[in-house]
Image (cartoon, helix red, strand yellow):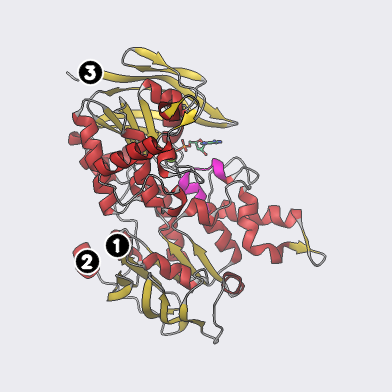
Amino acid sequence: MSEIRLEVKNISKNFGITKALQNVSFNVNKGEVHALIGENGSGKSTLTNMLTGIYTLESGTFILDGKEVHPKNQVEANEEGISIIVQELGTLSGLTVAENIFLGHEDRFVKFGIKNTKAMNREANELLKKYGFDRIKASDMIDIYNFEDRKLVEIVKATYFNPKIVVIDETTTALSQEGREELYKHMERIRKEGNTVIFISHDLPEILEKSDTISILRDGIYIDTVKSADVTEDDLKKLMVGREVTGDYYRSDYGEKVSDEVVLSVKNVSVPGLIKDVSFDLHKGEILGFGGLSESGMHEIGKAIFGASYDRTGTVTLADGTEINSIPSAIKHSIAYTSKDRDNESVVMNQSIGDNICLPSLDNLCAFGKILSGKKMKDFSNKFSKEMSVKMVDTNQFVSELSGGNKQKVVLARWIGKDSDIVVLDSPTRGIDIKVKQDIYQLMDRMRKSGKSIIMISEELMELIGMCDRIIIMKDGMTSGSLDRNKDINENSLIGMMV
Ligand code: ADP
Ligand code: MG
């Protein structure tokens, strides 16, 4: 019989009128990877944020190894043996790697009021080495590292002191395959040591493979806890959504001819160190996919088209001959772009949903010449947030309060509102649950049918295969192959070109 590590008892939490959690109770055992699943906004992060002292616990109790715990912040949580790798960026800019790893626990390195930075760096470097992340250096500023490396630093920070419970909140979507393998290794180690991982992910195959037990939340309500070995992916979808979900949510058409009309022509585009001599045409009404390993250069293609790569050479030309060389010229000529790094590059977190939606359309939202009209902005953001069914209190709510899927909907609402003809979507469904994914796929299909052209960059081969008229594979900064839409393509047909 497994031993109980954590009892979650009658936890409730409201944010204004949003009931994020309602009387949630379940148990988590020692020595298990316990997955927590549910659609966007079902309350997973709220629950684990309370367990780890990020949010205040107001109603209900957490009992760890038989003793009630009520951490008021992350440092207190760590002292109780609980840590978290958060969904958003969890390291602090302006500090070194070592300072981030030991954040809140620096006193270990302070003697007579003096911080022994050398000792701290030495210990951090030893940890990084032990974890196999030697390419990250303790004394470097964290800022020089990309999102993925910063997530690796978080893995060290959250696990080096052998906590009893480690929460991993949607970390895998931010990681490449290698990064994921690293994370899985540490999850397995924690489990073998008799400790517990609470694992949040939208990737159901990954959940089934890596977890022992799965608890399901739906709209803030606890649904069930099941053994991974006893359920299928479809069972889980049904538990999450509360109804049967058909597996088929991609486009179902095959053999439709794409228009010959070229709307955007990319010629000999290079960005030093990232992409080399990339050329392709995008057609009217086409969904053109880009796939590859995360470092293949495919993410740079989106930036290059949107005028966001400053040292780009080569040309990006519209049908009428207009050359796109900067973000303002891209926006002016009806090109939209959503970044893979949604939180840092796409949304303005500390602004309202309304302001975010209106941002690229401000020129059209003026009254009497150059003065912004509050009413026009309000109507505009209401209309497009509704069209995208953003789950929110109202458009005055800050974007920072929304779940990942809803943030993405705000980003898309912005470009739908702008009525862009060419839409570049980098990883549009990253970290997003099946229902919102389905909404986004349907939106893409509608846009395609209405003659808009889409570039979809994705690390998920299945969605490229399911949604695109054509897929270009990138490898080492160059295009390495291309496939037209076809029933017989499978992941292996693409992987061969990627590696
Ligand atoms: P999940 O992690 O399952 O996607 P969350 O726990 O982030 O879901 O969100 C649950 C609900 O609580 C959502 O409706 C979300 O908008 C709301 N919510 C979460 N955090 C906040 C916050 N800081 N302020 C207001 N509402 C929030
Ligand atoms: Mg979450």
Q: Inspect the magenta stretch and tell me whether residue 404 lies in it.
A: yes
Ligand 2 located in image quadrant: top left
Residue 443: x, y in percent?
46, 60
Considering only order in the chain, which callout, 2 or 3, is on the residue closer to the N terminus? Answer: 3
Report helix, strand or loop for mark 3. Answer: loop
Q: Amino acid at mark 2?
A: Val
Label of residue 251 in the image: none
Q: Nearer the viewer, residue 173 or 336?
A: 173
Pointers 2 and 1 in contact (CB under 8 A)?
yes
Q: CA distance from mark 3 to mark 2?
A: 44 Å
Q: Is residue 12 left or right of residue 232?
A: right
User: What residue is drawn where x is 82% and y is 65%?
Assistant: 368
Label of residue 499 in the image: 2
The residue beneath circle 1 is 293
Considering only order in the chain, which callout, 1 or 2, is on the residue closer to the N terminus? Answer: 1
Quadrant containing the N terminus is top left
Q: Nearer the viewer, residue 327 or 280?
A: 327
Query: In this rendering, is residue 12 above or below 367?
Result: above
Tell which residue pokes out farthest to the right in this image: 368
User: What residue is drawn where x is 32% and y is 40%?
Assistant: 238
Q: Nearer the viewer, residue 126 or 36?
A: 126
Residue 94: x, y in percent?
51, 46
Q: CA distance from mark 2 to mark 1?
A: 8 Å
Label of residue 3 in the image: 3
